[in-house]
């Protein structure tokens, strides 16, 4: 502005504020000791996979080292991780489950 014009420098943002909450990947990690059938059971029980889907995903983890087993809101992902870790610990298996922001 050339004279006393007032440009207050306030940016007008017309975008609607509809930011969605971040999502989190839940990952299962391979190890040398957890029985394959136990991992299959975990995937069926906590992630709602069919036996065939669970077996296939377990084999992917076994071969590749890890896999994403689902994508959830923070709270749901946190709950899944806690459920798997608790179940594995109670059965004395070293299975690891973690979450990662997408
Ligand atoms: N590697 C394990 C075995 O040979 C099986 C296994 C698969 C363990 C997936 C963990 O997340 C896992 N018994």
Image (cartoon, rainbow, N blue to C red):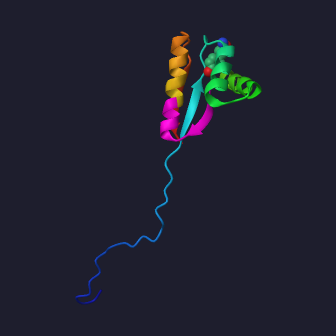
Residue 3 occupies quadrant: bottom left
Give x and y (percent) for residue 100.
51, 36
User: Which quarter shows the N terminus?
Assistant: bottom left
Q: Which residues are magenta?
A: 66-79
Residue at the limit of the structure toward the left, as seen here: 4
The quarter in which the C terminus is drawn is: top right
The quadrant where ligand 1 appears is top right
Q: Nearer the viewer, residue 49 or 36?
A: 49
> Does 74 lie within the magenta span?
yes
Number of marks present in the image shown: 0
Q: Is residue 82 magenta?
A: no
Residue 72 at x, y = what percent? 56, 39
Give x and y (percent) for residue 58: 68, 23
Query: In the rendered view, would you say 20 is above or below 8?
Result: above
Which sits in the foreground, 1 or 69? 69
In the rendered view, tell whether residue 19 sits above or below residue 33.
below
| Residue 58 sits above or below residue 76 on the image | above
**Residue 94 image point, x, y percent:** 54, 14
Rendering quarter of residue 10 = bottom left
Q: Is residue 70 above or below residue 5?
A: above
| Rendering quarter of residue 69 | top right
Which residue shows up at 50% across the image and 46% down it? 22
Q: Residue at x 29, y 81 (%)?
A: 7
């Amino acid at each position: 502005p050339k004279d006393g014009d007032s440009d207050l420098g306030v940016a007008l943002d017309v975008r609607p504020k509809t930011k969605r909450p971040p999502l989190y990947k839940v990952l299962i990690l391979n190890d040398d000791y957890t029985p394959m059938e136990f991992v299959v059971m975990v995937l069926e029980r906590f992630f709602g996979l069919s036996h065939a889907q669970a077996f296939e995903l377990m084999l992917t983890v076994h071969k590749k080292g890890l896999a994403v087993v689902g994508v959830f809101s923070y709270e749901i992902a946190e709950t899944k991780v806690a459920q798997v870790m608790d179940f594995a610990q109670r059965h004395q298996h070293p299975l690891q489950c973690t979450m990662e922001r997408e």
